[in-house]
Image (spheres, coloured by chain):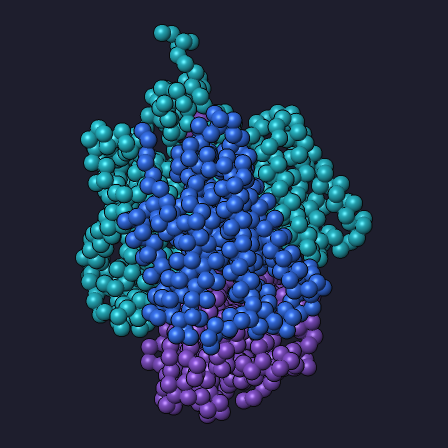
Amino acid sequence: MKKFSRLLALLCIAALASAAAATARPSSPSGSSAASALNCKSTLKIAFLTPLTGDAGFLGTEQMSWAKYAVKTLQGKYGLKIQLLGGDTQLDASLASSLAQKYVADPKVVAILGPSTSGAVAATSQTLYAAGLAHISPSATRTSLTKGTNREATPGFFRVVPDDSVQGPTDARFMAKNLKAKKVVLIDAQEPYSVGLADATQATLKSLGVTTIRESVNVSQSDFSSIVTKVPSDTDIVFAPFQQPPKAQTLAQQLIEQGKKAKVFGGDGTNDSDKFKVPGSYVSNFAGPIDSIPYDKAIIAGWKKDNPGATLGSFGPPAYGAAQVAMAAISKACAAGHGKLASRKAVIKQVKSVQIKNWILGGSFRFSSKTNDPFNGRFTIFQIQSDGKYKVVA
Amino acid sequence: MDDFIQYTINALTLGSVYALIALGYSLVYGILKLLNFAHGDVFMVGAYIGFGMLNLLGGATSPVVPVWLLLTIMVATAMAGCAVIGVAIERFAYRPLRDAPRIAPLISALGVSFFLTYSMQLLFGAEQRDYNAFSLDNGVLFLKGFDIGNVRVPLLRIVIISSAFVLMIALWLLVNRTRTGKAMRATSFDREAAAMMGIDIDRVIRFAFVLGSALAGAAGVMFALRAPASVTIGFVAGLKGFTAAVIGGIGSIPGAMVGGLMLGFAESFTQGYVSTRWSDLAVFTILILFMLFRPQGLFGRADIRKV
Amino acid sequence: MTDAELPTPNVPDSLTEPAGPAVGQDEWVARHAERRLLRGGRLGAVEERLRAAPWWAWLTVFVCLAALLPVGFSSGYVRRVAFDTVLYMLLALGLNVVVGWGGLLDLGYIAFYGLGAYCYALLSSNQFDVHLPTVATLPIVVVVGAVAGWLIGLPSWRLSGDYLAIVTLFFFQIFIVVVTNGDHLFGHNVTGGSNGIGGVDANVRPFNLFGHDLPVAHSGSFNVAYLYVVLAFFAVVFVLLRFVNESRIGRAWRSLREDPLAAELMGMPVNWLKLLAFSFGAAVAALSGTIFAALNAGVFPTTFAFPLLITVYTMVILGGSGSQAGVIVGAIVVNVLLELLRDAGNARYVFYALIVLALFGVYRLSVRLAVVLGGTIALGFVVHGIASAIAKSNVDGPANGENWLIDGLRHWVIVPRDLGPWKQITYVALIGVILLLTLVRGWWRVALLVPTLYLAAFVWENVMLTAPEATRFIILGAILVSVMIARPSGILGERRVEIV
């Protein structure tokens, strides 16, 4: 009897829970055929698809904090009331597509930030575009998403940072021409970001006649002693497109410790003047250090106040930018619809034409006319000075 | 030749950390016949305790105490903190299941491991933390040392290897030359007989957890001094520590030491001479081969089941 | 022997007492003793009827209810969650075979899931340009899964218990390494490496049944046909496994699980039985993998990771390993819980509802319950009042959502604007107090419960809701530990009786 009453009780709870879930999300016809247009004065929702736990949890939590800050400070400026939802993809593309379903079914969600990882974009872009949702990513840099013959993403996908096909060759050319490197070791961390970037860089280096050696370590490995020993002593550069600055720092320190002359060259993932500051190393980033941009100082101060103890990384500010682009597009769509949003597709139409002065990453922002990438995306290369400061060298 | 020496030093450093973790597994398994999955996460907590202590004492760039004292305090607090956590885990997650079928404490251990990892993420975030030990005293730990041939052995590695050895020898003395150690050995041989001889089993088990977790905490600090730590390092370290324990013979203390060093060598040399990409695979395959063909490891006793 | 002389069974009547093996009890009596506690009257008669209903009746009712779900909920999201739940039920059924029926702790189970998904992807994508129709791929993948299970089960001949668990865990790790680096296997790109197989260049085709491609989505929304497909698979697998369990193999598994040595001495082919258990479990997992790959039109290595393994284990353990109905209930409860916990608003409901239900469950309707509830609420208002008198910034109230619960909570729970080190301190303090609670009894426990509940509400609002992604896993871990200690047989499992 106890077993049965327990079972019945559980069934009741399950029924209640599903009733709660159903009432929490009003069921409505999916897609863009919403019967009533959305009033722009009501609270609209933007959902952020990013890994908040797991091996890439640091990436998602940093981006989320910046997106939250952007929504909090900018929604008034665009005349909107926005609620930001966080969808933890856990670096799992299937979870991402299930989350995409969730946001597709919620008629108040008018735009998506992210997905942050290229794999998740490939898995969800069709679903999101078919439902009319614009998705603006601050960090998915796989080239084949928007370029090439077999594009993995749809016209609903936008990104606010340049992709690997810009960063890789830029870095490679700098190494070959400015640094006159003859031998370069490239280390990737067996995940899509570093593999893609290392591939792009290696290809250009080879075409410029530089000897390249490719190593690959597990993403959870942070002690590089043996790889450092393997680096030949005549290597000029070790290219380490890691996503975490402490790894690059450790790599550089271990190179010094073992008496190798090679310098570390990090990608935009290692850009963090607090954590990666071994003098003589190089870092490439899609923007200058934003704490030297005058109008960013207030933004950074405000963000730091909201996030005590957090340090300024390089993955976060683009999320602020992506949120800003999303809000700008929504407000333009609202203006075009005279205070009403007829459908989500109205937002997609406006994204491409968004232009932002005083872009958080420096300069002004607009999209390229050919692809949904930033116009004239270029990478800046820094050298770390002896006092740990980043100095622009290219 | 230089490379070979360097790989050997890498192996010894890595291996010492693995050996310390393996000792914790061995101690607990010897008495309880339980694989403490949460042990790797205790290691991770140790690294974070060390980090907290470092910050409390001024951080790597401006510590308020001399470097040697700083390191000692970090290791000591990590050992103490982890010992407390180990005892708590034993008392609340394993003791109620002491007479349950073997599967029960294993699953409970899985749950504790998961709980610890994500609690730490909740409290301290998911990003990697760096002790930044390089800045300590202008890098003296990394740049000064003594030379073997053309290879310089930095001070920090010597410190790590020697303190690990000191701890292991201390443990060996504790287990073989004291009464409590004797009680531990008796309990691991036959728990019921030991209880009938008047040994307080609860105290002995608690002692084993204290020792094992303290060693894991020390290992955590030593690891984090050289490489950045995040909440997920516990899982991999636990796997490798367990591999070391099995290779050496689970339940045997010199076995755990040897196993740890062997694992360090296997990993270091595979990464160096074979391939960095497949070094993990090599390590796991070694373990599986050992478990299939010599489950008692190098120093262990073949377990005879009494019916 | 009259009714009065039959031995009273050792059935714990409170969740707080550990339900360990009932030593010395007759097994039949212990298992069926609950009959003696039936209520009389009409309710008892209803229960008898329900109890007497055959298992296939319950299955039919369940499948019909599940099939009618899309009628009630037209939201693509709810349907997708239903699909995920049924997929998890399939996985749990498979794990139940290995852990529940075979008694073997298989920590590499998700590797078979991944194997099935990758095999399907390799057979229906541009990776090797093989495009078999689904009716051909499914049997192939199931057979591959079964063979893999057989091979991985081979170590069980020499190892048992913990060692077997570790060996399977290591096979799992090997699988992950091979799949992540599969684009450099002897120079060939087999598994697509860390990018997986998916996207346009190696598009994994969705199910192709009888010449028709089953589209994955309609204008972005989940295609409900997949829910029906997975329900059909689920029903078939359930019935098949049920028949296997009721056959000689099932009985042999039971004897193997209870006492392997005795089983061997009685002439059971213990080794082959273990391999069979592994194979069946792996085959079911591989089948689930194919559906998964088809729906997602791609496979990625990061999906098959340790957290997924723990999730499926929690479902099986919570539901009751060894009972098919149990693991289904477990799967539903855990998956719905995890989905509800994604969103802070829903999570709040879940938390308070669970607390109240648990209190009712432990204390029934009694003075103690009134004391605990009343005391906690009163304490809350008092502390809140004091805190807001000290500093207004202490009590800004929860930030998200507006509904009756939030309004009520606004004056009860403290939500400081600046948490500082209190985040860590209160969390650790809460864990300490909860552990202390398990040590005390009686009125001391009631007294301690009041501040504990308030502290728990504080920690929930301020700490755990700010990072729901970590909270979900913390709760899974806590469920595993508490279920094993308080009620190892789970919700619907059978209590194990140890014969001395």
Quadrant of the frame with the C terminus of chain A:
bottom right
Quadrant of the frame with the N terminus of chain A:
top left
In the image, taking residue C435 as reference, residue A141 lies left or right, namely left
Give the percent coordinates (x, y) of residue C347: 55, 49
Give the percent coordinates (x, y) of residue A164: 44, 79
Q: Residue at x 32, y 36 (%)?
A: B304
Give the percent coordinates (x, y) of residue C110: 35, 52
**Quadrant position of residue A181:** bottom left
Q: How many marks?
A: 0
Q: Residue at x 48, y 58 (%)?
A: B16
Q: Residue at x 50, y 78 (%)?
A: A259
Closer-to-camera residue (A203/B263): B263
Q: Residue at x 58, y 86 (%)?
A: A392
In the image, taking residue B234 as reference, residue C429 lies left or right, namely right
Q: Colour of chain C?
A: cyan
Closer-to-camera residue (A238/B187): B187
**Residue C122 seen in render:** yes
In the image, taking residue C243 as reference, residue A217 lies left or right, namely right
Closer-to-camera residue (B132/B247): B247
Shown in purple, the chain is A
Shown in blue, the chain is B
Give the percent coordinates (x, y) of residue C160: 32, 41
**Quadrant position of residue A384:** bottom right
